[in-house]
Amino acid sequence: MTGHSWDRLFFVSGTPPKVTLRSKLSNLVLPMHRFTFLLFVFPLAAVAAAPLAPGDSVRLTRGETLFFKTDKLIDAPKGQEFPLLQLDAVRKVAYVAFTKRDGSVIAATVPNDAVEAAPADGWTDLVRGVEAFRDQRYDEAKRLLARAVQDPQQKALAAAVGARVNGALVAAGNARAGRATFVTMLQGLRETAEGLVKLGHLSLAVPLDEGADKLATAVGGEGLPASKIDRATLGKGAAVAARAVARTRQAVALHKLVEASKEIEEGLQAEPTRPELKAYDAKVKKDLDEAKSRFEQADKMRRFHKGEVHALTAIEHGLKLAADFPQLLALKKEMSSAFEERTSPPVTPEFLAAAKVSTSRAALEQGHKLYTTRCTECHDLELLDSRGASGWQRTVAGMSRRANLTDAEQQRILDYIAAAQISVEALASK
């Protein structure tokens, strides 16, 4: 097959040479045997965009609170991705898959106007394609495998797997007229699954082999090739890796990188070649190193005269990278009084004298209470000098819907923040 495009395969009568995937896939050999004429053209037209359907990856178009029934699960940031379970047009909600710590999956809800299709990813399409083949959703399998071929990184693997799947489906449809061809194509599926195991792609090998079983059952008869892999053992590893991917994605979205690193380690032990985990591993390690650097910087600066403000800034920046970094959390706790002074100082006579604003003390106290209670339901408070007046206006407005704040309450918070910024700066300059 050297010189031929992998997205268009022609199988002709005779005994073609063995087909070997290029580059890193060179160890996966797909032997072809003598069979009657079969023409397979990969269905590139199937790549056209389709409406959102169960199983699709969706991402949040804005920050949203996820609920399970009436219980709040988490506050998820804009851009976080989830597998779609169902769109309910009547209730105007989307059900998405949320993976709990124990690996169980529950259906969480968000407003359906808060989700959109996530960018296409070749590996995800490839996994979902073989899973659709396993579940006998053959049209969907063809569509997803065809789309996976468009990803340059997955093109060779997706084209080879897609060729086997489509060839087996064509042969199964003509099994009565050409049973020998079906046996050959089924053997190809078994050998492909075995080759995928050797490459470490358990999440592809297991569903592909299970799909071959179902196809063989549908056709029936004796003498059909049996599985070549230990699905029971390999399936457990694939399940661990899949759970780790879901948990890692959720943890990274919430900047819980210590938790993510543990999930990644467990997932890669189960399936070392899992692409999502390898990509996350590099990014998480980089950000954890940066968080550690921020901790060391903060720990050093707090020991200098007037270095406290720089230490607080380093801690805040570090926790924005890794919200569960233990040393940063411990240092923040140790410096809690200093954090309060620069994030949410109480409205005292000293505060009022320094702020010199016309807003009444009662209104400022109400703003302080709203800010320190309602605005901490989703996240920790930030340093008051982390943004200017316009930045705080956008932030408070953006969070008001999730915190159920009225326009009057938003204004109280903004009035307090504006006075607190002046007060903190004035008192710090003394």
Image (cartoon, rainbow, N blue to C red):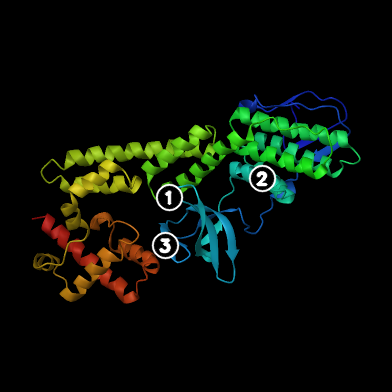
Residue at x 63% of width, y 28% of height: 25
Q: Amino acid at mark 3?
A: Lys
Indicate the position of residue 370 as horizontal and vertical percent values.
Answer: 27, 69
Quadrant containing the N terminus is top right
Residue holding disc 1: 253
Indicate the position of residue 354 as horizontal and vertical percent values.
Answer: 11, 65
Q: Secondary structure at mark 2?
A: helix
Residue holding disc 3: 72
**Closer to the N terminus: mark 2 or mark 1?**
2
Indicate the position of residue 321 as horizontal and vertical percent values.
Answer: 35, 45
Indicate the position of residue 153 as horizontal and vertical percent values.
Answer: 60, 36
Q: In the rendered view, tell whether residue 326 sits above or below residue 200.
A: below
The image quarter in which residue 424 lies? bottom left
Q: Measure how far apart labels 3 and 1 are at the Cα level.
A: 17 Å
Q: Image check: 50 left or right of 113?
A: right
On the question of residue 314 being in view, the answer is no
Instruction: Residue 408: give its label.
Output: none
Residues at circles 3 and 1 in contact by the CB criterion of under 8 Å: no
**Closer to the N terminus: mark 3 or mark 1?**
3
Q: Image check: 16 left or right of 112?
A: right
Residue holding disc 2: 129
Q: Amino acid at mark 2?
A: Gly
The image quarter in which residue 64 lies? bottom left
Q: Measure how far apart labels 3 and 2 are at the Cα level.
A: 33 Å
Q: Image check: 101 left or right of 372?
A: right
Q: Secondary structure at mark 1?
A: helix
Farthest residue, direction right: 177
Q: Image check: 191 left or right of 176?
A: left
Q: Secondary structure at mark 3?
A: strand
Q: Amino acid at mark 1?
A: Ala
**Closer to the N terminus: mark 3 or mark 2?**
3
Residues at circles 3 and 2 in contact by the CB criterion of under 8 Å: no
